[in-house]
Amino acid sequence: MTDLITRVENKYMKKDIPPVEPGDTVRVQVRTAVGGSDESATRVHTFEGTVIACKGGGINRSITVRRVTYGVGVERTFPLHSPAVVNVEIVRRGQVNRAKLYYLRDRHERAARLKERRAVAGEDATVADSGEEMTALEAEAIASEPEGGEELETQTGEELKDEAAEQATEPTVGREDAEPSEVSEESSEDTAS
């Protein structure tokens, strides 16, 4: 009996749902009816917010998404495998230590912000994979990393000593850090003659 139920559930489960976790900021596109009783008139509504809870498993998996609009907190629960849910897109990953983030209901503005989770090596679903454009900081970090065959330039101890010796041999005329002993020897010779 359970094998039959599993086969029927697998038939209706969506394959393109990303692994959503609490703390993630997601953009859920859901189909809603427009107007009166005419079922043919529908539109796709986008709801973007922070996932504060994930419940269930398999075909019954649902997420609760919270956002604050004009100072009013709005929470919606979406069954992920519902035909009404068109697409779920992860905008940003949040770093949290709890499964349920109900404490965000009592926080406002900056206190309700979550730290962004750093990409872990081997993690498949990252912001860059979701098709979003990279931020300037991400692009700079990638550009500053050396390529596979490229080596970083490092100076040996001898090169550093040579560089310091060159700086020491530069003329010290007009420099504030000139040694006073040199000046005093010259001035004593001038006064003696």
Image (tube, rainbow, N blue to C red):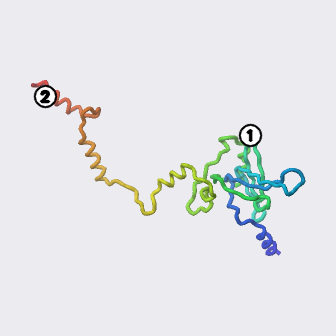
Please name the residue shown 28% across and 33% down the image: 175
Q: Residue at x 68, y 40 (%)?
A: 109
Quarter holding the C terminus?
Answer: top left
Sort mark 2 into few (<14), some (14-19) or many (20+) by Cα contacts within 10 Å: few
> Quarter of the image holding residue 29?
bottom right
- Alpha carbons under labels 1 and 2: distance apart: 82 Å
Q: Toward which corner of the image does residue 68 lie, by quadrant? A: top right
Q: Secondary structure at mark 1?
A: loop
Query: Label for residue 189?
Result: 2
Up-down: is 179 above or below 166? above
The label nearer to you, 1 versus 2, is 1
Q: Looking at numbered disc 1 in the image, what kind of residue is underneath it? A: Tyr
Residue 39: horizontal and vertical position, in percent?
87, 57
The residue at 47%/53% (across/down) is: 144
Q: With respect to residue 79, does 166 lie above or below?
A: above
Q: Position of residue 67 (x, y in %)?
A: 73, 47
Left or right? Give the position of 26 relative to 141.
right
Badge 1 or badge 2: first in the primary sequence: 1
Residue 151: percent from left, percent from top? 40, 59
The residue sitting at 57% across, 50% down in the picture is: 135
Specify the farthest residue to the right. 37
Q: Does 116 sit left or right of 32 as displayed?
A: left
Q: Which residue is mark 1?
A: 70
Amino acid carrying label 2: it is Glu
Of the pair 87 and 171, the residue shown nearer to us = 87
Judging depth in this view, the residue of 130 and 56 nearest the camera is: 130
Q: Secondary structure at mark 2?
A: helix
Quadrant where the image shows the N terminus = bottom right
